[in-house]
């Protein structure tokens, strides 16, 4: 079975109604990154940070996977697929993808403030009581915090993502500005000579010359990729 790795970013979930981070009206225009997405911001005002992610989690609970997510999941009928996502939403899983690596954490999970990456202290949040409050305690006794990789923190899942690239046949990028490292650097680990597709309605600078660009939104772009490429693959 041929193997595909798909790297996704915020643009993947735009058609579900979730916003992107950069560009006009992006999330980082309205909320200073240093306040809500760094360990220092959390130390300075944990209540503000918990509320920022509570809002995003409540929003996530009102939206559904879009056709793009579903088409990505449908590829599993034909191929061995690993989704490597920078998104903290669970829309790939809800659409049916079974192998998803979350580089930047998961909104529907919480973890220890002391040891954020210790799996023993990671727990899943359930709707409707999915808000995190000051005083909610992780299994190690520390404040529960969102299971999100903040700027300045290590990205331990990068190793799994790099491992997933060994021996792949196709690499696909959907809806990411490729601004954030180390995630964007994954492209450098893609074996040379294999096709790399990039689906995005806007211009994205990919640090490789052989990228085949499909300048469309996630759903339409996935339809094009399937019709014009995957359905014709041997
Ligand atoms: P960005 O907001 O940087 O980029 C979103 C991309 O989605 C842009 O290239 C848009 O052109 C594209 N886009 C917009 N609408 C689209 C559509 N309908 N279909 C497909 N693409 C569309 O988001 P990311 O690259 O995901 O990290 O950002 C990476 C990381 O930066 C995030 O994971 C987050 C953020 O800070 C953390 O919070 C740690």
Image: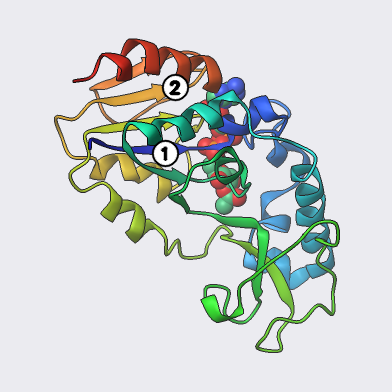
Is residue 17 at least partly visible in the picture? yes
Say if disc 1 is inside 8 Å of ligand 1.
no
Q: Residues within 10 Å of mark 2 (few under 14, many from 20)?
A: many
Q: Is residue 45 visible?
A: no
Residue receiving disc 2: 199
Left or right, 122 with respect to 118, comes to right
Q: Position of residue 2 (x, y in %)?
A: 23, 35
Residue at 50%, 33% in the rendered image = 176
Examine the rendered structure and indicate whether residue 203 appears above or below residue 74: above
Of 184 and 196, the residue lying toward us = 196
Which quarter of the figure has residue 145? bottom right
Q: Residue at x 38, y 12 (%)?
A: 227
* Quadrant location, ligand no. 1: top right
Element under label 1?
A: strand
Q: Element type at marker 2?
A: strand
| Quarter containing the C terminus | top left
Q: Which image quadrant is residue 204 in?
A: top left
Quarter of the image with the N terminus in it: top left
Circle 1: is it few (<14), some (14-19), or many (20+) Cα within 10 Å? many
**Image mark for residue 7:** 1
Q: Residue at x 82, y 50 (%)?
A: 55
Q: Is mark 2 within 8 Å of ligand 1?
A: yes
For residue 112, side relative to residue 136 (left or right): left
Picture layout, residue 143 above or below residue 3: below
Q: Position of residue 228 (x, y in %)?
A: 34, 10
With 122 as the anchor, is 210 left or right in this view?
A: left
Q: Nearer the viewer, residue 222 or 143?
A: 222
Q: Quadrant of residue 139?
A: bottom right
């Amino acid at each position: 079975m041929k193997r595909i790795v798909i790297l996704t970013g915020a643009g993947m979930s735009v058609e579900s109604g979730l916003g992107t981070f950069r560009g006009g009206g992006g999330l980082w225009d309205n909320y200073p990154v240093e306040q809500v997405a760094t360990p220092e911001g959390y130390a300075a005002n944990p209540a503000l940070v918990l509320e920022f992610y509570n809002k995003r989690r409540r929003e996530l609970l009102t939206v559904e996977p879009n056709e793009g997510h579903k088409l990505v999941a449908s590829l599993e009928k034909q191929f061995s697929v690993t989704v490597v996502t920078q998104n903290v939403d669970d829309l790939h899983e809800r659409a049916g993808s079974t192998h998803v690596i979350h580089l930047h954490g998961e909104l529907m999970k919480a973890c220890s403030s002391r040891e954020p990456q210790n799996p023993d202290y990671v727990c899943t949040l359930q709707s409707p009581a999915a808000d995190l409050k000051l005083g909610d305690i992780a299994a190690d006794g520390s404040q529960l915090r969102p299971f999100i990789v903040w700027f300045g923190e290590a990205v331990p899942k990068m190793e799994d993502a790099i491992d997933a690239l060994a021996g792949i046949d196709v690499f696909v990028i959907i809806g990411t500005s490729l601004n954030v490292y180390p995630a964007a650097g994954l492209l450098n680990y893609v074996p040379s000579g294999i096709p790399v597709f990039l689906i995005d309605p806007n211009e994205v600078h990919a640090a490789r010359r052989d990228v085949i660009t499909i300048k469309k939104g996630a759903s339409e772009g996935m339809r094009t990729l399937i019709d014009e490429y995957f359905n014709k693959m041997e």
